[in-house]
C-alpha cells in the first residue's frame, strides 16, 4: 500500500501546476474518493501559498471521475486583510474532476464564544468493535483507515436510522495530525443513506461543504469520531449532515454533503 504521507509527498510541482497519480489502493471504484480529491486540493493550495492563515471553510464539487494522472491548479481569488479565498481545480483523464473553493482566515478578537455541538454518547475506540465486519468486502481505500463502531447503524440495515457514529484514524501514523489528513479522513464513511439501502448499489458524492471549528485540530492517538446522518433520500439524491469530534469530545468540523444514490 502507498501511505497517505508518501502519496502527498509524491505531489510534484510542474510549471505552476501540481501533478500526482493516485495508486489503485486509494480508489473508490474507478475514481479517487472524494475525501482524497479534497485533500489533494488543500495540499496544493498549501504548497502554492505557504503563508496562508488557517483554513476556515471549504466547498468541493465532484464534477467527474478523478482517474489517471491528475493535475491541480491553484488561484488566489481574493486576498483581504484577514481572509483569503482560493480556487483549486483538479483535473484527470476525463477532464475537470473537482472544483474547490477554500477560505482561509486569521483569528480575530471577538466577544463571542459559543458552541452547541456536543459529542453523542458513544463507546470509545478501545471498547468498540470494527465498523466493517471482517467477512464483508470493503471499498478499496478503506484499507488505509482503522474504523470502530461507536454507535449508530451499519450499511444495509434498513430497520435502523440512517446514521453512522464511527471512530476513524489513519493507519499511517505520520498522518494522524494536520488539516490535510483530517480532510481525507472526514469523508471516509460511506454515505449514511446506505444504512437503509435494501441491497448494495452505487453511490457518488456530488458536493461537500466543510466549516472548520478550530484553527489547529488535534486529538489523542489519531482517533476522530465522524457522525454522518441522512436527512432525506428522494429521486436519487440524499443530503446528509456530518460532524467530526476529537477524542476529548471537542467539535472540529461541521459539514454537509449531497450524494447521488442508484438504488
Image (cartoon, rainbow, N blue to C red):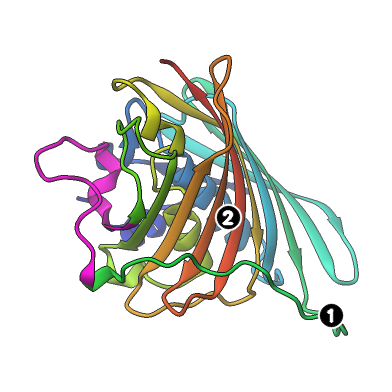
For residue 181, side relative to residue 223 (left or right): right
The x and y percentages for residue 131 are: 25, 51
Kindly identify which residue carries mark 2: 42
Label 2 packing within 10 angstroms: few (<14), some (14-19), many (20+): many
Q: In the rendered view, tell whether residue 41 sits above or below residue 5.
A: above
Q: In the rendered view, tell whether residue 254 sits above or below residue 17.
A: below
- Splitting the image into 4 quarters, where does residue 82 fall? bottom right
Q: Judge depth for marks 1 and 2 and give the one in front.
A: 1
Task: Please say whether residue 76 is one of the residues in the magenta stretch.
Answer: no
For residue 87, side relative to residue 186 (left or right): right
Task: Please say whether residue 142 is one of the residues in the magenta stretch.
Answer: yes
Q: Earlier in the sequence, mark 1 or mark 2?
A: 2
The x and y percentages for residue 96 are: 59, 27
Task: Report how far apart the C-alphas of labels 1 and 2 lie in the structure.
Answer: 29 Å
Q: In the rendered view, tell whether residue 107 sits above or below residue 149.
A: below
Tell me how many marks there are. 2
For residue 54, side relative to residue 105 (left or right): left
The x and y percentages for residue 150 are: 33, 60
- Splitting the image into 4 quarters, where does residue 238 fall? top right
Label 1 element class: loop
Circles 1 and 2, Cβ within 8 Å, touching? The answer is: no
Kindly identify which residue carries mark 1: 112
Label 2 element class: helix
Tell me the number on the disc at residue 46.
none
Residue range corresponding to the magenta coloring: 127-150
Q: Residue furthest left?
A: 135
- Specify whether residue 68 is in view: no
The x and y percentages for residue 175 are: 36, 67
Amino acid at each position: 500500500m502507498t501511505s497517505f504521507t508518501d502519496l502527498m509527498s509524491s505531489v510534484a510541482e510542474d510549471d505552476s501546476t501540481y501533478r500526482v497519480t493516485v495508486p489503485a489502493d486509494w480508489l473508490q471504484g474507478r475514481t479517487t474518493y472524494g475525501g482524497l480529491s479534497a485533500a489533494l486540493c488543500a495540499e496544493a493550495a498549501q504548497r502554492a501559498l505557504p503563508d496562508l492563515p488557517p483554513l476556515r471553510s471549504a466547498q468541493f464539487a465532484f464534477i467527474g471521475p478523478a482517474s489517471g494522472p491528475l493535475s491541480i491548479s491553484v488561484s488566489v481569488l481574493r486576498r483581504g486583510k484577514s481572509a483569503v479565498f482560493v480556487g483549486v481545480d483538479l483535473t484527470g483523464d476525463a477532464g475537470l474532476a473537482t472544483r474547490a473553493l477554500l477560505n482561509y482566515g486569521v483569528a480575530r478578537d471577538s466577544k463571542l464564544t459559543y458552541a452547541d455541538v456536543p459529542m453523542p454518547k458513544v463507546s470509545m475506540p478501545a471498547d468498540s468493535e470494527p465498523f466493517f465486519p471482517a467477512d464483508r468486502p470493503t471499498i478499496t481505500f478503506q484499507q488505509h483507515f482503522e474504523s470502530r463502531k461507536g454507535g449508530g447503524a451499519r450499511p444495509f440495515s434498513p430497520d435502523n436510522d440512517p446514521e453512522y457514529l464511527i471512530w476513524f484514524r489513519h493507519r499511517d501514523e505520520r498522518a494522524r495530525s494536520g488539516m490535510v489528513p483530517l480532510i481525507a479522513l472526514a469523508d471516509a464513511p460511506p454515505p449514511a443513506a446506505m444504512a437503509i439501502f435494501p441491497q448494495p448499489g452505487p453511490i457518488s458524492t456530488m458536493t461537500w461543504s466543510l466549516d472548520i471549528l478550530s484553527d489547529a485540530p488535534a486529538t489523542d492517538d489519531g482517533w476522530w469520531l465522524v457522525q454522518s446522518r441522512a436527512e432525506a433520500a428522494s429521486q436519487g439524491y440524499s443530503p446528509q449532515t456530518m460532524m467530526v469530534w476529537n477524542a476529548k469530545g471537542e467539535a472540529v468540523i461541521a459539514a454537509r454533503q449531497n450524494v447521488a444514490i442508484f438504488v
